[in-house]
Image (spheres, coloured by chain):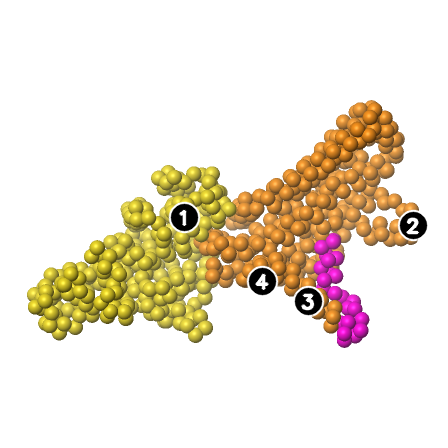
Amino acid sequence: MNANMFSRLWVLIRREIWESPVAFKWTPLIIAGFILLVTILLLIIGAKVDNEQVFTIDGIRMYAQMDDAQQRLMAAGVMFSAGSLFHQIMFLVVVFYLAGSLYDDRRDRSILFWKSLPVSDQMTVASKILTATVAAPLMYLGGIAFIQLALVLIASGYGLMADINIFSEVWAPANLPKVWTVTLLGSLVQSLWLLPIYAWLMFCSSWAPRLPILIAVLVPVLIGMFQHFWSFFSNFRLPDFNLLWVILERIGRGVMPASVEWEQIINASESEPSFVPKEEMLMSFKSIGNAFVSWEMWIGVAIGMLFLAGSVWFRRRATDS
Amino acid sequence: MESSIIRAQGLSRRYGSTIALDSVDLDIPAGRIVGLIGPNGAGKTTALKAILGLSKFSGKLEVLGMNPSKDRDDLMEDVCFIADVAVLPRWARVWQIIELTERLHPRFSREQCMKYLARTKIKQHSKVRTLSKGMVVQLHLALVMSIDAKLLILDEPTLGLDILFRKQFYTSLLNEYFDEQRTILITTHQVEEVEHILTDLIFIKDGKLIVNNTMDDIYEQYTEVMVGPDGLEQARSLNPIHERVLFGRHIMLFDNADQKRLGELGEIHKPSVADLFVALMGEQANDQTDGSGAGEKAA
């Protein structure tokens, strides 16, 4: 029964990826291609400016003489900046995907076909939210891994040219297996942070008579504005707790890598202006794990579950008309 | 005793002040092909949606012994439906739809489906959006007929298809799909095409069942007589439920009249479903110019 359930969920998730190949397959590939193109262009321009490659080779050798921690920090910085673009774009893609997830088939009436299959509405909703929270991060991780590998390979080429030990100076500091593990676990935690927002979009998608994305955005914006003005005119001050602010903060949390110890970095840089973070602060398993003892995250998950239950309720009653 | 496939008691549904289904009683046994016929807005789709668990209803309704609104997920393993033409997901490729149905439907036979598709021009790699309307219906019918279901519900299955395909479809439905274990419920406007395959007939109007009987009983109950000009008065005295004029001859429809006396009045034959429909369902039936079904038949 359970094995059967998982295989059915797997089929339904594949269905989602078949339906939106641009969102889940082509977008990460295009981002990877874009980063690769920009990198190559920069290298070509660099080669033109630095005709004999003297400065480039000098720079590489200087890097090779840095201590381990510095090398790791630089490598992690490059790896993370390459990866962050993926997560930001993925968030936007998933927002649009979810807003249409329970709406598009009502609009084109193919819901009648889907409802003719022996698939429960819980299963349908589960497959769509899992596509957003697990399948999409995995597909985008593929793009991230590809571009990170490409960057390390390019760096290795330059390293060979500069005659440095590429294993100890490039591959070891870049530590791709660790980067990939941290990114994978981090992005799953980020999905949990974003669950209330994802589930809200799906909830709107399950009942909106039209334009679910607009409804999903307008409702919190209007509530936030109303809250703002109400508090301003009744108490002559701005509210301490504004819905819009909470949502924006949450989106920020969900889009930034969960493995970064933001608080430590911010606190340290406040007390010490010349503070330079360590690689461990960027790729911290502890920071990922901390999310699980954060009541804020679990409140979000609970709210998300309520919206998902609501989505199932509306999906149950949805037909073509 | 035959087991019921669909059993309804006092099945009702209202939308605001409109009554779409008005306390319908229904009992459909296994191994039947039932035609659910009615004018637009009579409650056909409402009834089908209730049976499929797609809309709310009041009253008692059992489909294959299950409550369609509660046990919908289990029910769909044994019930197949084509709710309307061309509702397959437009983004999907043919092979993807077949794959999905195979993985999600325990009673689907890929082999059977390929057999049906081989007769069409549908290619595995085509996207549904690029198929013609007729091809989408062919694909959908191939999928549905490859599922070993106990109840098949077809809501206007051949709408917008050419006559060749419609004939072919009903022939294969009857010869290759239908057997005593299965029940088929069809709604359609093209009654002339289905009447030869129906075993049961239901007429629905304003949410009420006007006729609900087997075809055999219907042919026993209703008789059509072509009356010559001299028998007119006598025939009218027997209270025909409907009368129309065709090439100067009066065709009258009688309900439960004495066959022997009718035989003396003129030529007797079985009424067509279309003529019955016009006679029983339309107030406008009194208007002699109407009766599109009858007109088509004459042509």
The amino acid marked with disc number 4 is Gly
Residue B2 part of the magenta-drawn span: no
Residue A20 position within the rendered picture, expressed as x and y whole percent measured from the top left: 57, 46
Q: What color is chain A drawn in?
A: orange
Residue receiving disc 4: A310
Residue B225 position within the rendered picture, expressed as x and y whole percent measured from the top left: 14, 64
Are the residues tagged 1 and 3 within 8 Å (C-beta)? Answer: no
Q: Point out the frontmost of discs 4 and 2.
A: 2
Residue B177 position within the rendered picture, expressed as x and y whole percent measured from the top left: 32, 47
Residue receiving disc 1: B133
Q: Secondary structure at mark 3?
A: helix
Tell me which label, 4 or 3, sits earlier in the chain. 3
Q: Secondary structure at mark 2?
A: loop
Cα distance in 3D space between marks 1 and 3: 45 Å
Q: Secondary structure at mark 1?
A: helix
The image quadrant that residue A144 belongs to is top right
Cα distance in 3D space between marks 3 and 2: 40 Å
The amino acid marked with disc number 1 is Lys
Residue interval drawn in magenta = A231-253
Are the residues tagged 4 and 3 within 8 Å (C-beta)? Answer: no
Residue receiving disc 3: A223
Label 4: how many residues lie within 10 Å, few (<14), some (14-19) or many (20+)?
A: some
Residue receiving disc 2: A272
